C-alpha cells in the first residue's frame, strides 16, 4: 500500500473506532436459514434491509477486503469494479476491472460505481455512510458490512458475502480452510514460549480490541501494547518502547523497517534481528487471507530467540549509548480493513495523522 493510502486509512480507522466506542457495532441480520436462494434479504450496518432479487451477474467491491473475499469465493469473473492498485495487485485479473477509487487510493469514485450499475455493491465498514446513501440515491443496491475486530468476524463476513452473491458453497469451503489454518496455528503454540510482541506501523501500534491483537495472541505471543493498557491504535513513545522491550516487532512488508532511533535500537527485537515483515495486504485486510498472515506470524514466533534464553552480554562490551543503525526485517510472507475501538491516546493521534500513513 502507498503511504498516502495509509494516512487516509489510519484516519478512517480512528473515525470508525470513535464511532464504535460511542455506540454498539452494527452487525448484519440475514434472513433465517439462508441457503443461497433468491430473493435474499439482510439488514446491513446502516440498519437498511437490503434485498438482492436474484443471483448477481455483476458485482462491485468498494474496498480491498471485499475484493479479496470475492476472489476467494471464485466470484472474480462477475466482479466489474474494485479497487485497483498496489493493495490489490496480488489478485489475479484485478487490472481488468474498473477502478472504483479516486486518486487518493481510498475514497470511492461514485460516478464510476454508478456508471457500472452493478447488481450488488459491497461496502466494507470503512466506507462512510454518506457514500452508501449517495449511491443508493443513484439507484444502486449497496450492502454495508458491520464493524468487526475478530477472526470470527472475517468468517461471518465471508459467509454473508457468499449469500449476497450466490456463492454459498464456495464460502463454506473457504471458511473450512480458513478455520483449519487457524486451528493448526493454535495447536502449534505449545511447541514454543510466548515472545513479547509489538506491532509497528508508522509510529502507531495495535492494542487490545484489534485484529492485530487477536493475531498476536492466537499465534502464541504477548502483545506488549495491550498488556500495558493500549486499546485500539495508539502512538508509540520512546519511553514506553524501552520499558516494554519487545522481543519481536511485526511490520508490514510495504513499510519494511522500524525507525532508525536509539530507542528501537535498544530493544531485544532489533538487537537480535527479530523485526518481522508480514505481507501487508494480508495483515491489514479483514478477509480470508488474514489466516496466511497468522501463519507467518506464528512461524516467526516459533523461530524467535527470547530474552530469557539469550546469553547475557558482557557489560564491558555494551556501549551506554548505542548509535542508531538501520534495521532490515526478516521476511516471513505466507504462500498464498480490522479495527478496534479507540479508548485512549485519541488526543495524541490528531496531529500525527497529518503527517502519516497502512
Image (cartoon, rainbow, N blue to C red):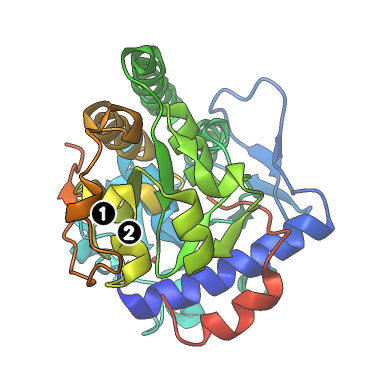
Q: Is residue 193 visible?
A: yes
Q: Nearer the viewer, residue 212 or 156?
A: 212
Tell me what residue is drawn at x 29 percent, y 69 percent: 321
Residue under pointer 2: 266
Q: Nearer the viewer, residue 330 or 342?
A: 330
Q: Left or right: where does residue 97 sit relative to residue 11?
A: left
Q: Nearer the viewer, residue 232 or 105?
A: 232
Image mark count: 2
Residue under pointer 1: 270
From the top left corner, tell me how far across and down residue 67 is, in percent. 37, 53
The local secondary structure at tag 2 comes to loop
Q: Is residue 156 above or below residue 320?
A: above
Tags 2 and 1 touching, CB below 8 Å: yes
The local secondary structure at tag 1 comes to helix
Tell me what residue is drawn at x 53 percent, y 60 percent: 240
Q: Residues within 10 Å of mark 1 (few under 14, many from 20)?
A: many
How far apart are the two marked residues, 2 and 1, measured between alpha carbons? Answer: 7 Å
Q: Left or right: where does residue 216 sit relative to residue 208?
A: left
Amino acid at each position: 500500500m502507498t503511504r498516502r493510502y495509509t494516512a487516509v486509512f489510519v484516519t478512517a480507522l480512528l473515525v470508525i473506532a470513535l464511532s464504535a466506542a460511542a455506540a454498539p457495532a452494527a452487525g448484519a441480520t440475514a434472513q433465517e436459514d439462508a441457503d443461497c436462494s433468491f430473493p435474499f434479504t439482510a439488514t446491513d450496518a446502516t440498519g437498511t434491509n437490503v434485498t438482492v432479487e436474484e443471483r448477481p451477474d455483476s458485482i462491485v467491491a468498494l474496498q480491498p477486503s471485499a475484493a479479496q473475499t470475492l476472489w476467494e469465493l471464485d466470484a472474480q469473473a462477475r466482479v466489474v469494479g474494485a479497487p485497483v492498485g498496489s493493495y490489490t495487485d496480488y489478485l489475479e485479473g484485478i487490472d481488468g476491472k474498473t477502478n472504483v477509487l479516486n486518486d487518493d487510493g481510498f475514497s470511492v469514485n461514485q460516478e464510476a460505481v454508478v456508471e457500472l450499475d452493478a447488481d450488488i455493491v459491497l461496502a466494507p465498514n470503512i466506507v462512510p455512510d454518506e457514500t452508501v446513501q449517495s449511491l443508493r440515491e443513484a439507484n444502486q443496491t449497496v450492502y454495508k458490512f458491520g464493524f468487526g475486530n475478530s477472526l470470527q468476524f472475517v468468517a461471518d463476513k465471508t459467509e454473508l458475502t457468499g449469500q449476497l452473491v450466490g456463492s454459498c458453497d464456495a464460502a463454506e469451503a473457504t471458511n473450512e480452510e480458513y478455520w483449519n489454518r487457524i486451528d493448526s496455528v493454535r495447536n502449534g503454540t505449545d511447541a514454543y514460549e510466548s515472545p513479547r510482541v509489538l506491532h509497528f506501523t508508522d509510529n502507531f501500534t495495535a492494542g487490545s480490541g484489534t485484529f492485530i491483537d487477536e493475531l498476536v495472541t492466537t499465534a502464541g505471543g504477548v502483545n506488549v501494547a495491550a498488556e500495558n493498557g493500549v486499546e485500539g491504535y495508539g502512538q508509540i513513545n520512546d519511553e514506553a518502547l524501552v520499558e516494554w522491550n519487545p522481543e519481536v516487532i511485526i511490520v508490514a512488508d510495504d513499510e519494511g523497517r522500524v525507525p532508525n532511533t536509539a530507542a528501537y535500537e535498544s530493544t531485544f527485537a532489533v538487537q537480535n534481528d527479530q523485526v518481522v515483515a508480514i505481507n501487508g495486504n494480508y495483515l491489514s485486510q479483514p478477509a480470508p487471507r488474514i489466516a496466511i498472515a497468522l501463519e507467518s506470524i506464528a512461524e516467526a514466533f516459533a523461530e524467535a530467540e527470547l530474552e530469557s534464553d539469550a546469553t547475557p552480554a558482557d557489560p564491558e562490551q555494551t556501549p551506554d549509548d548505542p548509535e542508531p543503525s538501520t534495521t532490515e526485517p526478516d521476511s516471513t510472507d505466507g504462500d498464498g480493513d480490522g479495527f478496534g475501538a479507540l479508548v485512549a491516546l485519541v488526543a495524541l493521534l490528531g496531529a500525527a495523522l497529518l503527517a502519516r500513513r497502512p
